[in-house]
Image: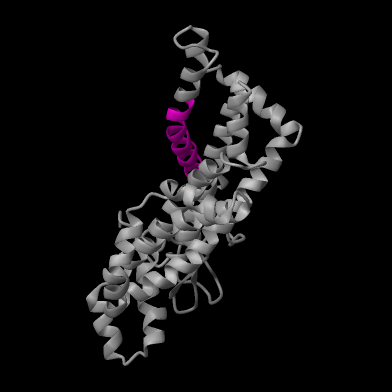
Amino acid sequence: MSSVTDIADGPAGTTGTAPTPGGAGPGTTATTGSAGAVREDTAPHQPAPGPRKAAPARPRARRLRPAVRRALYGLVRAGTRSVAIVALLLLWESAPRLALVDRTFLPPFSEVAVAWWGLAADGRLADDTLASLTRSLTGFGIAVAVAVPLGLLIGWYRRVADLLGPLLEVFRNTAALALLPVFVLLLGIGETSKISIVVYACTWPVLLSTISAVRSVDPTLLRLARSLDLPPVRLFQKVILPASVPSVFTGIRLAGAVSILVLVAAEMIGAKAGLGHLINASQYNFAIPQMYAGIITISAIGVAFNQLLVTLERRLSSWRVPAGG
């Protein structure tokens, strides 16, 4: 009796399914031919490739994080700088109200602010401020234009320093306000005497700082420049002036403060307009809030002028490496 098998040698063309060697999966079929050879047909089931995913965009919050950090740092820094001023204003407001001082001579800050607004509204404060700024800036500009070139010459040329040194020592130790009566006697009580006293007072800080700046230039830079055979004009332009800018601007900032302080004193003598005249007239008329309003205006102008000079100094000395690294 013959046995029946799942896979047998039969006529050509018959096919059967048999397990493939190695345990092929269900997706593998075997085909038998006439020679009984087994051929594997592999049909792997792979998913069709989908569209390529784009790289995730950078979160907007991450992009804004540095800007937010800078803004917070600026607010904290501004708040720290304002603490002392706010404390002073609070003390000024509360001390007269608590009878710690006589409010006749030191009114509360709120009353001074009302008086300042009244002066600004009727145009008197603007006229006085314009008159003072015109005199101050004119004298300051003349002093800088004269003192910087003269300081460069005295600092660089030893013979010029030996010639002018004794004369400079005499005048730089003479206070500008001590010479105010002399300027008034020689030049009158008009604009010339007021601008001249500002020029005299502003010249010395700029002149002395410029001389010191030129004499303190790094000798290594000078030797390198001379090794390149730079002419004197190029040496001044490329080495002396850039190295002197920080020290020169220190003197210029001092001169900016001096120009306002000396001018106020000069305007108290024979002036018909100006912040000094406003303060002096308010004192005589016993308008104490208006007097303090003029003083606050002078302080605000001084702070703004100094900040302007600091910004200009940073622009001209942007090549410097900060001290912190």
Q: Is residue 125 above or below residue 210?
A: above
x and y, in percent, of residue 277 in the image:
61, 37
Query: Magenta stretch containing residue 99, yes or no?
Result: no
x and y, in percent, of residue 134 in the image:
63, 52
Q: Is residue 123 above or below residue 6?
A: above
In-front residue for pair 49/317: 317
Q: Evaluate whether residue 304 shows in this view.
A: yes
Residue visible at 75% across and 36% down? Answer: 123
Q: Is residue 236 above or below residue 110?
A: below
Give the residues in magenta. Answer: 68-86
Apparent side of residue 310 relative to residue 246 in the rendered image (left or right):
right
Apparent side of residue 167 relative to residue 260 in the rendered image (left or right):
left
In this view, the residue farthest toward the front is: 185
Apparent side of residue 81 relative to residue 323 in the rendered image (left or right):
right
Q: Quadrant of the C terminus?
A: bottom left
Residue visible at 70% across and 30% down? Answer: 119
In-front residue for pair 283/69: 283
Task: Report which quarter residue 301 is drawn in.
Answer: top right
Residue visible at 53% across and 49% down? Answer: 305
In this view, the residue farthest toward the bottom is: 229
Query: Magenta stretch containing residue 71, yes or no?
Result: yes
Task: Report which quarter residue 276 is drawn in.
Answer: top right
Task: Report which quarter residue 167 is drawn in.
Answer: bottom left
Q: Evaluate whether residue 6 shows in this view.
A: no
Residue visible at 42% across and 52% down? Answer: 254
Q: Tell me the chief SS of the magenta region.
A: helix
Q: Is residue 219 above or below residue 277?
A: below
In-front residue for pair 136/222: 136
Q: Quadrant of the N terminus?
A: bottom left
In this view, the residue farthest toward the right is: 122
x and y, in percent, of residue 182 in the image:
47, 51
Apparent side of residue 320 relative to residue 257 in the rendered image (left or right):
left
